Image (cartoon, rainbow, N blue to C red):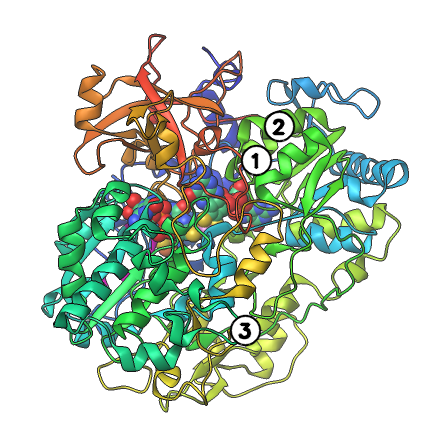
Amino acid sequence: MTSYLERIRQSSDITRRGFIKASAAATAALAVSGSLAGCANKVEPADANAGGTEAVAVDGEWVTAACWHNCGGRCLNKVLVKDGVALRQKTDDTHEDSPDYPQQRACLRGRSQRKQVFSADRIKYPMKRKGWSPDNPQGELRGKDEWERIEWDEALSYVADELKKAKEQYGNRSILAAGSEIGRLLTLFGGYTASWGTGSYGSFALTAGIIGAEVWSGGINDRIDMRENTELFVMIGSNPAWSSGGSPAFHMLQAKENGARFVAIDPYYNDTYELLGAEWLPIRPGQDTAFLIGLAYALIDGDAQGGNLIDWDFLNTHAIGFDAEHMPEGSDPRGNFRDYVLGTYDGLPKTPEWAAELCGISGERIRQLAEEIAPSRAVALMCGWAPARTHNSDGFPQVFSTIGAMTGHMGKPGHMTGVNCHSAAGNGGPSLVNPGPSGVAAIKEVPVDDSINKTEIWKAIMTGRYTWNGRSGTVTMPADAEKAPGEVRDIDIHVIYHGGGAALQTTDAMSEGIAAHRKVDFAVSHAQFLTTNALYSDIILPVTTLWERPGGLLTGNREMLIMYTQVTEPLFESQSDQWIARELAKKLGMEESAVYDIDENQQFFNTVAGATYVEDDGVTASPLVTITEEDIEEWGAVGTPQEGVISFKDFKEKGVYQIERKAGDNYGFVAYSGFAKDPESNPLPSLSGKLEIYSARLAEIVNGMGYSTIEPVPTYIPQACGYEATFGDYAAGEKGDYPFQIFNIHYLRRSHTVFDNIPWLREAWANPVYLNAQDAEERNIAAGDTVRITSPYGSVLRKATLTNRVIPGVVMLPHGAWVDMDDDDENDTAGADNVICGGCPTGQGVSGWNTAICNFEKYDGEAIVDDAARPQRIICE
Ligand SMILES: Nc1nc2c(c(=O)[nH]1)N[C@H]1C(S)=C(S)[C@@H](COP(=O)(O)OP(=O)(O)OC[C@H]3O[C@@H](n4cnc5c(=O)[nH]c(N)nc54)[C@H](O)[C@@H]3O)O[C@H]1N2
Ligand SMILES: Nc1nc2c(c(=O)[nH]1)N[C@H]1C(S)=C(S)[C@@H](COP(=O)(O)OP(=O)(O)OC[C@H]3O[C@@H](n4cnc5c(=O)[nH]c(N)nc54)[C@H](O)[C@@H]3O)O[C@H]1N2
Ligand code: SF4
Ligand SMILES: [Mo]
């Protein structure tokens, strides 16, 4: 069971010494060790918050350091720098903290950032896999081979030669690539095969835009409105305490303190619900559509009995497809939602009791909830994207919005129906402070139009076929989107270029992904660490972190903008992605200026000079930063002086510009308010301009994609790899080989895969598998036991945490752990989620990570070590 990574383990002492010799910056960072103690915010030299155990007085300059991850937050991080050495960190102390004007405080990951930047496992030099050569790639050794240091020129020549070879022998579409900088380069080189997916949004990606609903921040009201006006929050799969760093959970707490009540619909009683004292309605993963259809029945039924549960005025004027009287012209009136719910034509009334069987929440409680969300009360209907990251969930955003339209909880203070997630959680509305454009010219021509749905990319490499749908990137679709072609195409990938992202980790079907990496001629990764992409590549190009770049602006919640600047010179031989793209352009015989016509310093200047803020009238956007001749000269940029509301020097020193909010200001936001007041003048972006409970367009597009089909109204469809799949014989109630459902929560130790290598964080967050205590006990599993979790796609080992906060029949495995296969490639010892989740495109090509099935047992082999005792992956001396 000793993995390759364990075998390359170095004595941490020796490694540390080697690292210290090589970098003065590293010396200091490693010398200041200790635990993550205290969270007092005011940082003085001897403060425990600085993370050090030694109370040593230090001076130096506080520099605003980037925290740039896709973590759902955006906070102010400062680093105390002396003689180029990063000594300590602190967070926002630019003003007093208050609910109206909260500090932008960092989380445990941000506060550990210097442990990442100066980590002993940084990729310091270009590296080559020993067994790889252009003539004999020995692909089967990927992930098991040793590494050797090579020079930049040699590394870039290898990459350029492989790209040229692939282009000449197989055409540009034989190159599969990701990453914006390398995407620019390869587009100019004649194109490449890209990938697309529904990503974070799940089925919101396509469904929301077509039916006229919001995907993100535009669907919920702003935080002050919530705090002042909302009485009841119904939260479906939403966890800002873990997945929206900064203040969102704090904003929701203000609403609680103002008397609001919370109901949580989730398979896991998460820390947000605990904080808010929410009532828990435990639901099976992926069964939210059944639950909401049952809730719709309860609303119809309760209203018919005189309960005033439906806001008919709103529903009849703002939505189409609810009943036979409000169907779009030309459609079959029998296809309406109400008759589906009542079972008028299919003979199956979708009663709350029908829903209870499927979702696990009792019929009685569903009926009671229908009364609680009556139009007369100020209710916030909120969901995260997690319930939509499930197979066959194309109707989920539609039925969720339908409940909002039925109850009229849209467009009024205190009332809302929308997504509460990521950096917009707890505070909806457009950004009030925005960066300017970088000035880099856009590349419009896309010479290769092959783009593979992420659920299929590894399979496409293995089988040479994929379903083309004319999509690219993370897909969000407008109402008038083209019908998808759903065309099966041949594809022959020879090169994988990882220029950004963590595809091998974060895409479904990782075992197939590893096989695909072993099949191609060449794989290259830009990397800061020996990430999974890098581990299974042939050449690794070391990239800088944002602490080593000139500077830039970072956006997050709507009220602030962060400006970071360089903390340290590039460490060792690392270079930026743009530098790599330019150098490769030269080797490919192209003009480097065609890839980037202006440098990174000028791009930084442009974003700052073009930054705007919204004035206190709430509408006028004006220049943010005052820039003088001297600033421009010092910066070494090209530009003209300008007037704003904060000087460049102040902005740089503070690191953040934040709008001060208070009740009654002009920055409030009520989602859908114009539409609610006058739908004719303020139509939604759907084809009809109304909320489409019936959308022939949605069905036409989804059904054309070649995966699985839907109806124009939201209906219950048993999910691939969902609840029903846990049964061998569903009708007989007999469980099958994989009797448990398993889902992935976004975990506080990491931002996806990022930070998984940081010992401090491994110590603080152990990354166990969370088992329902009763399920575990029935299998003789005690807390801390090593458990083997198996799915049809692979198996992982994890230590068990037993809890009653996960419902029986369900297993929770945190998202993003760096895969670590044992010697036989049989078990992953790190608990990587995508070893368990397989590629299974349904409907709109959704990545349905939260619908997977598994079994688990006490592992009879050697117990795994705690992650904190796992060696770092150090391959550079
Ligand atoms: N099973 C399962 N899979 C999931 C999810 C799930 O819940 N379950 N969640 C999904 C979601 S919502 C998302 S958004 C995706 C995220 O998927 P990814 O975007 O692929 O995940 P990250 O880990 O954020 O990847 C960022 C990578 O960029 C690297 N990096 C950081 N800075 C730089 C830089 O300057 N240059 C370069 N070249 N690299 C850099 C980091 O080291 C890291 O490897 O994962 C998805 N995958
Ligand atoms: N710490 C941390 N924060 C992050 C990230 C990270 O990797 N780490 N990633 C960021 C990114 S890119 C994204 S997209 C967001 C994702 O944020 P979310 O989409 O909110 O995803 P999760 O945090 O996985 O899940 C939120 C809640 O949904 C529940 N849930 C899961 N499946 C279901 C279901 O089928 N039905 C119901 N009702 N509930 C369900 C979970 O138990 C959890 O309580 O988080 C962002 N924030
Ligand atoms: S929430 Fe995100 S931006 Fe904020 S400190 Fe944590 S990792 Fe950094
Ligand atoms: Mo995401």
Q: Position of residue 739 (x, y in %)?
A: 33, 25
Q: Position of residue 865 (x, y in %)?
A: 34, 18
- Residue 620, located in which quarter of the rendered image? bottom left
Q: Are marks 3 and 2 in contact (CB under 8 Å)?
A: no
Task: Give SS at disc 3.
Answer: loop
Q: Residues within 10 Å of mark 2 (few under 14, many from 20)?
A: many
Reply yes or no: does residue 245 show up in magenta. yes
Q: Residues within 10 Å of mark 3 (few under 14, many from 20)?
A: few
Residue 35 lies left or right of residue 603; in this view the side is left
Q: Which mark is residue 536?
A: 2
- Residue 129, located in which quarter of the rendered image? top right
Q: Which mark is residue 504?
A: 1
Position of residue 2 relative to residue 236, above or below, is above
Please name the residue shown 36% across and 70% down the image. 323
Range shown magenta: 242-250
Residue at mark 3 to residue at mark 2: CA–CA distance: 54 Å
Please name the residue shown 23% across and 28% down the image. 801
Residue 433 lies left or right of residue 607; in this view the side is left
Please name the residue shown 35% across and 62% down the image. 339
Task: Give SS at disc 1.
Answer: helix
Q: Is residue 303 visible?
A: yes
Callout 1: CB less than 8 Å from ligand 1: no
Q: Which of the two discs, 2 and 1, sits closer to the camera?
A: 1
Which residue matches tag 3? 330
Reply yes or no: does residue 640 show up in magenta. no
